[in-house]
Amino acid sequence: MSLKFSYSLIAPFYDAAIAGASANIRKKNLLNLPQNGNLSILINGIGTGLDIPYLPHAHHYTGLDLTAAMLKRASARTGELRIDLVQGNSLTLPFSNESFDHAVLHLILAVVPDPLACLSETARVLKPGGSVLLLDKFLKPNQKAWFRRALTPLSAQIATRMDVVFEDVLAKVPQLKVISDEPVLAGGWFRAIHLIKT
């Protein structure tokens, strides 16, 4: 089953499963965006638009998602926010180098089949000095987590991976550096990570 197909099926139920548990940590993480200015910000994997209520209105946003079903739900949340919704693949972003001042990746890096390609592409389209705000579930380096790893072949086909070690991915994208890394949910399985492009 492809992620595009599975997330098209999941779209009507996604908010009920995710919205409540993630609302506060989304809001807190998005406070790391500049509140003023007129910046260009990529929401890579915007899904149904659960980040939209917490985005500063001063900026222009581009929200990308793989499925039309998710983008349709996101469009209902946009209100007066300046945002373009784009259907596309996070692994091969349809944007020029250094197009964005900042990027948000909430619950996408552990969803895609190739986290390295997703993070590398995000770095490519980010201007030097720009930040990446991550929120996702990651294993720690050398963490056994046999059950999560065993479930990944199935869960990755339906909705998400459970075996992504963030440090292993980041090591191959050297232009991104960690500013902060905080455990936020499920005993530190979910982390809010702030990166900057040097």
Image (cartoon, rainbow, N blue to C red):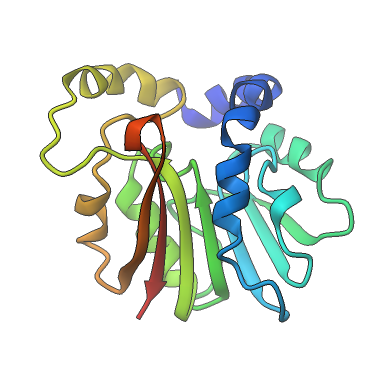
Q: Residue at x 66, y 54 (%)?
A: 63
* Quarter containing the N terminus: top left
Which of these two is toward me, 27 or 196?
Answer: 27
In the image, taking residue 142 as reference, residue 14 lies left or right, namely right
Vertical relation: 107 (above or below) 3: below
Q: Is 91 rendered above or below residue 136?
A: below
The x, y position of residue 77, in whole percent, is: 81, 44
State which quadrant residue 173 falls in. bottom left
In which quarter of the view is residue 119 placed?
A: bottom left
* Percent position of residue 2, x then y: 46, 26
**Residue located at (76% from left, 35% from top):** 73
The residue closer to the viewer here, 32 or 101, is 32
Residue at image position (54%, 22%) is: 6
Q: Which residue lies furthest to the right in this view?
A: 80
Splitting the image into 4 quarters, where does residue 170 fall? bottom left
x, y percent for residue 50: 68, 41
